[in-house]
Image: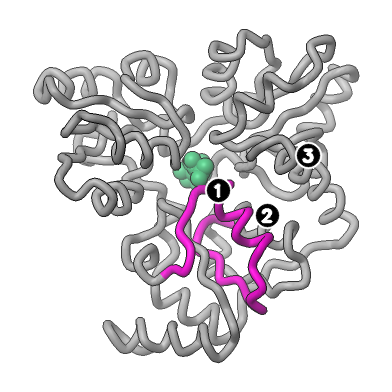
Amino acid sequence: IPQGEDLVKAILDLKKEKNAVILAHYYQPAAIQDIADYLGDSLQLARAAKDTDADMIAFCGVHFMAEAAKILNPTKKVVLPDTQAGCSLADGCSGAGLRAMRAKHPNALIATYINCNAETKAESDIIVTSSNAETIIRSLPEDRPIIFAPDKNLGKYLMKKTGREMILWDGSCIVHEAFSMERIAQQMADHPHAKLIAHPESETPVLDLAHFVGSTSALLNFVEKDDAQEFIVATEEGILHEMQKRAPHKKLMPALVFDESCNCSECFYMKRNTLEKLYLCMKYELPEITMDEELRLKALKPIEAMLELST
Ligand code: CIZ
Ligand code: SF4
């Protein structure tokens, strides 16, 4: 495997040779973000995957996101650097689990966060992301109960925002649950001019402390546009790379976590991807995401329902 600058060049050569596009999530290691053709959050990347005319999509993110790319654009070859790049939310909610929940609440609509695998999507009525969840929940018929899966923290936040009761699946993101309200309160006392901004996958006490709560893209926009010059950021630390590029003169601090030996929260799954593995997956076109067509069509339906409702 080439190293350093040669590695970057080899990846760019492969991209041309194979007419590939590199999509990367904001939580990816900085070197991968820098080489990507398109950087985005889960909703933006799903759209980019749907619209691309490249022959191969090298998806630098976690497994469920690469699956979503395949669901939306099945004629493309979708490869991802490491199939072990999972997600605690996706792993904690199976299609069978949702089916059992539907059996208990037969009249309910199931709204599922995009952080789930294809089987789980296939059992859902509509998919949401953190950018469009509020709008979508508000648009659901008032006379139907709502089951919300798999993130209970986002679910609780949405119930508060929309006033809609929901039956919550008991799942969470290990990265966003790592934040310590006590340590963040101390951090705010130490930096009295800093604004705390948080992703709604964080726990309620952190969200209650925050000056602003929003999706990955909303947090980026907020830091860029807001008058404040200092921010404490309660979401995965990878985002600070792009945030700092967009707001080069602002001071950005990762929010503190329970574990006092760490100074930020990193998604271990997202960080499994490396430039070396990206090179290898493009060269050998493996590991490739494949999907049974019947499952794909079932999983596509609730994603299309979401795309229709979000601008
Ligand atoms: O995986 C995540 O935690 C998030 C917030 C993904 C995304 O881009 O919405
Ligand atoms: Fe999953 Fe959390 Fe990692 Fe996002 S940050 S991929 S929700 S484990």
**The disc label shown at residue 146, or none:** none
- Going by the image, does 23 lie left or right of 135? left
* Dot 2 amino acid type: Ala
- Going by the image, does 244 lie left or right of 34? left
Element type at mark 3? helix
Element type at mark 2? helix
| Ligand 1 within 8 Å of the CB at mark 3 | no
User: Mark 1 touching mark 2, by CB under 8 A?
Assistant: yes
| Magenta-highlighted residues | 36-63
Q: Position of residue 170 (x, y in %)?
A: 61, 24
Q: Position of residue 213 (x, y in %)?
A: 41, 25
Q: Nearer the viewer, residue 228 or 40?
A: 228
Q: Position of residue 102 (x, y in %)?
A: 84, 25
Q: Residue at x 33, y 20 (%)?
A: 210
**The disc label shown at residue 68, or none:** 2
First in sequence: mark 1 vs mark 3: 1
User: Mark 3 touching mark 2, by CB under 8 A?
Assistant: no
Q: Residue at x 55, y 73 (%)?
A: 21
Q: Is residue 293 above or below residue 206?
A: below
| Ligand 1 within 8 Å of the CB at mark 1 | yes
First in sequence: mark 1 vs mark 2: 1
* Dot 3 amino acid type: Ala
- Going by the image, does 91 lie left or right of 213? right
